[in-house]
Amino acid sequence: MTEGILRAYANTPHGQIHYRHAGVGQPLLLLHQTASCSEQFEGMIPSLAASYRVLALDTLGYGMSDPPPHQYAVAEYADSVVAFLDALGIDRAYIFGHHTGAAIACEVAAGYPDRVDKLVVYGVPYWDEPSEMLESRIRYFPLKDDGSHLMEMWDDITGRMREGLFPKPYSEEALETIQKEVVWKLMAGERRNEAYIAIYRHSRDILERLPLIQAPTLVMSGDQDGQRPALEPVAARMRRNRTRMLKGGSYFTAYDDPEALAREILDFLANPGI
């Protein structure tokens, strides 16, 4: 266990939600990418917990949280986040979401504006393509008796590493990151793609939901991130926002540069400038 970071479960109508927590003060909720878990944020939590009560939950179906009872839509994942806040007696919070977590965070802010004071999102998933086409790209990894599905998962994750950002031979830190992501993908089991399906089906709807967000919002991406093209169209639909492009930022920024990402969050929450 990382020093100072505790773990617990919250009982909700959606199932038990596992979370990591540290610090005191205004609640700051962290929502992770798929198919990871709240461990993604362990490098950031100590910096954030110096100023806030940090709560990093495992999305339903991932990490150590219960799976949802059926294929959830993004709105249902958002409902589960609000149920988590209810279970902890939290009325309002700041929220940071990363990739899939960013889509869920936006929906929480759009559907429950009275629950979100400030919003920070990194790599909001948006594609101007039919959901059927997006879903056709989902990779499935059926178990194989020779274990080759493990190598396929490894290749799937390393394929998201932008060339030059993680030079080969991979550093020990990079290898540990890849291994963690493979482990959590395995842990999610046969339902590991449900959050992907949800955000693909939500991709066209998200532009209609973004104008409903009332909270001051920082919209971020990285110049090495696959969601970089979505930064401008997403921000253009929000009422009160500013944007930030992180040099060298990627799908793995929470792992490879957690202090820089935490600093961006802290700076915005202290002074949104909107």
Image (cartoon, rainbow, N blue to C red):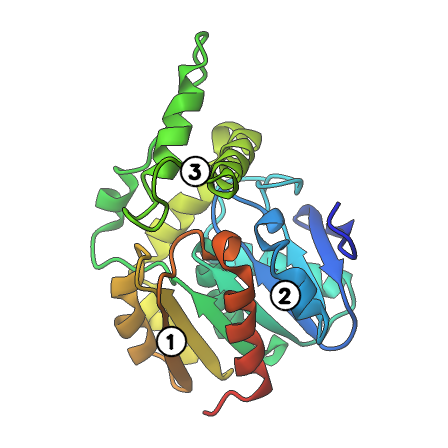
Nearer to the camera, 203 or 257? 257
- Element type at mark 3: loop
Name the spot of residue 272 as percent of width and height, x first.
Answer: 51, 87
Q: Is residue 237 left or right of residue 66?
A: left
Residue 60: x and y in percent read 59, 46
Badge 1 amino acid: Arg
Numbered disc in front, either 3 or 1? 1
**The residue under label 2 is which amino acid type?**
Leu
Which residue is more in the foreground, 23 or 96?
23
Count of picture labels: 3
Can you name the residue that lies furthest to the bottom here? 273
Q: Quick check: 241 left or right of 36?
A: left
Q: Which residue is mark 1?
A: 244
Looking at the image, which residue is at 41% across and 30% down? Answer: 154
Vertical order, 153 against 223 (above or below): above
Q: Secondary structure at mark 2?
A: strand
Decide which of tag 1 and tag 2 comes sooner along the chain.
Answer: 2
Give the mark nearest the N terminus, 3 or 1.
3
136 vs 145, left or right, is left
Q: Looking at the image, can residue 25 be seen?
A: yes
Precedes in sequence: disc 3 or disc 2: 2
Q: Which residue is mark 3?
A: 193
Q: Position of residue 160 (x, y in %)?
A: 34, 44
**Residue at left offset 55%, top offset 34%:** 188
Comparing 97 with 39, the one in front is 39
Residue on which disc 2 sits:
29
Q: Residues within 10 Å of mark 1 (few under 14, many from 20)?
A: few
Q: Quadrant of the N terminus?
A: top right
Report the quarter where the C terminus lies: bottom left
In this view, 114 is above or below 271: above
